[in-house]
Image: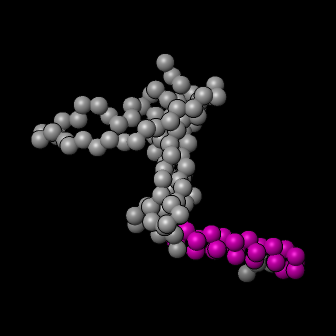
C-alpha cells in the first residue's frame, strides 16, 4: 500500500532563545494527517547491527519515503536560516548579483540603443 501526500515540518523557537521545538507530520492527500512522535535513541549493539531503518522508503509517495522526508526537513531548516556545513552563501549571493548586473547592463544597452562592447 502506498500513501500519497507530503511531509510537513514546522520549527518554533522557544521564547527564551536557544533551540526550539520541531513538529513533523505527513499530510495525506485524503486530508488525514500523521504526526511523527518523539524519536527514541537506543544504544547500538556492539557489532553495529541495525535491525530496522528509521524510515522505510516506498511506503509514502509524492514526495515521500526517506528522500521526501529529508527534502522537507532541509526546506524547513533553510527557511529558519540553517545552511549545510561548508555551504558558501557568499558565492551564491555573488553569482546572483553578477547575473542581476548583467541583466541591468543588457537593459541599459537596449534602452540607450548602444551595442554591447
First to last magenta residue range: 91-114
The mark total stands at 0
Q: Residue at x 32, y 34 (%)?
A: 53
Q: Position of residue 117 (x, y in %)?
A: 73, 81
Q: Position of residue 9 (x, y in %)?
A: 53, 46
> In the figure, 11 relative to 59: above or below?
below
| Magenta residues, dominant SS class | helix
Q: Position of residue 63 (x, y in %)?
A: 54, 36
Q: Nearer the viewer, residue 113 or 7?
A: 7
> In the figure, 72 relative to 82: above or below?
above
Q: Nearer the viewer, residue 82 or 88?
A: 82
Q: Position of residue 92 (x, y in %)?
A: 55, 68
Q: Is residue 101 magenta?
A: yes
Q: Residue at x 29, y 31 (%)?
A: 52
> In the figure, 2 relative to 86: above or below?
above
Res. 87 visible in picture: no
Q: Residue at x 51, y 69 (%)?
A: 89
Q: Is residue 90 magenta?
A: no
Q: Residue at x 49, y 67 (%)?
A: 17
Q: Residue furthest front?
A: 16
Q: Residue furthest left?
A: 46
Q: Nearer the viewer, residue 81 or 16?
A: 16
Q: Quadrant of residue 108?
A: bottom right
The answer to whether residue 82 is left or right of residue 4 is left
Amino acid at each position: 500500500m502506498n500513501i500519497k501526500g507530503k511531509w510537513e515540518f514546522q520549527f518554533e523557537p522557544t521564547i527564551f532563545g536557544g533551540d526550539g521545538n520541531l513538529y513533523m507530520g505527513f499530510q495525506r492527500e485524503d486530508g488525514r494527517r500523521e504526526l511523527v512522535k518523539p524519536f527514541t535513541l537506543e544504544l547500538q549493539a556492539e557489532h553495529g547491527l541495525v535491525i530496522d531503518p528509521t524510515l522505510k522508503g516506498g511506503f509514502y509517495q509524492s514526495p515521500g519515503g526517506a528522500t521526501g522526508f529529508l527534502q522537507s526537513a532541509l526546506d524547513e531548516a533553510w527557511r529558519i536560516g540553517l545552511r549545510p556545513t561548508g555551504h558558501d552563501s557568499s558565492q551564491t549571493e555573488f553569482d546572483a548579483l553578477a547575473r542581476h548586473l548583467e541583466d541591468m547592463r543588457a537593459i541599459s544597452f537596449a534602452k540607450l540603443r548602444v551595442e554591447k562592447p
